[in-house]
Image (cartoon, rainbow, N blue to C red):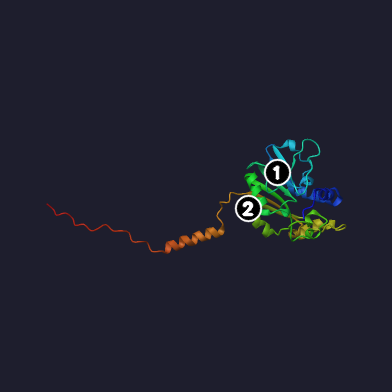
Amino acid sequence: MRPGLDTLRAYYAGGDGRRTARLLAEIVAPAVRTDASARLLALGYPAPLMQGLDPARIERLCMVMPADQGARAWPRRGPSCAVSARETALPFMEALFDQALLVHALEFVDPPKLLRELWRVLAPAGELILIVPNRAGVWTHFESTPFGQGQPYGRNGLGALLREAMFEPIAWKTALVAPPVRGLKWLDRPLTRLLPALGGIHFVLARKTDGLAVSPVGRAHRASHAGAAARQPAPDLPREPHRRAPPRP
């Protein structure tokens, strides 16, 4: 079940939520473009990770808060960039954004439909920035956090899902290894060095592709077909009928 807006706001207003937001913001920030020509779509509830990002300094920024989650104005000051909409029916034309940041989003919807819609609104070679619960992490067992709700993903399954939707992962990282229990937070850094695959979340940076790359299976099939063709005997060519040379005068 998807947490509502009030639940998400309450979590990130607390000490644990603020700490989690700071840590995730440090991971996400290097991937998010902030130059004057940047065009960013933020989806789900990414606001706590976007503190300090000024929409007036980039070309385009829109935050889509899912209708079944609830929405509120963002940022607090200035014109709001937030809109309430269905993630699988985004109210935008094709290729309108260069990047899409998803937080508390993919795990609550039909993934192929959402990824298909994101592929549509992203420009060629556009980038997908994902924060998704990790099935191998302990955070999925703590429903007191938003990362303990929704559908968690293993690395192999998430990678296959992205590739099927024509997104190629180009950077991958996990974080939040220590369980969200008071008194154990200090273990996060040492455990991250020792057990990086057990982080509570996946951070994935994936690039939109055109879907025309040749897969290894397709390549092998074609090579096998070509080899079989080469082994076939060459067909007999039709021969010209034999003609006698004309008699000499």
Helix, strand or loop at label 1? It is strand
Any part of residue 140 in sight? yes
Classify 7 as above or below 236: above
Any part of residue 176 in sight? no
Which of 77 and 174 lies nearest the eye of the viewer?
77
- The earlier-in-sequence mark between 2 and 1 is 1
Which of 246 and 238 lies nearest the eye of the viewer?
238
Residue 205 numbered mark, or none: none
Give the left or right position of residue 218, taking residue 169 as reference: left
Residue visible at 43% across and 61% down in the picture: 229
- The x and y percentages for residue 21 are 80, 49
Residue 41 numbered mark, or none: 1
Amino acid type at circle 2 is Ala
- The x and y percentages for residue 202 are 73, 55
User: How many callouts does the rendering have?
Assistant: 2
Which of 102 and 51 lies nearest the eye of the viewer?
102
- The x and y percentages for residue 168 are 63, 52
Categorize mark 2 by other alpha carbons within 10 Å: few (<14), some (14-19), many (20+). Answer: many
- The x and y percentages for residue 92 are 66, 42
Residue lying farthest left?
249
Helix, strand or loop at label 2? It is loop
Name the residue that disc number 2 marks: 165
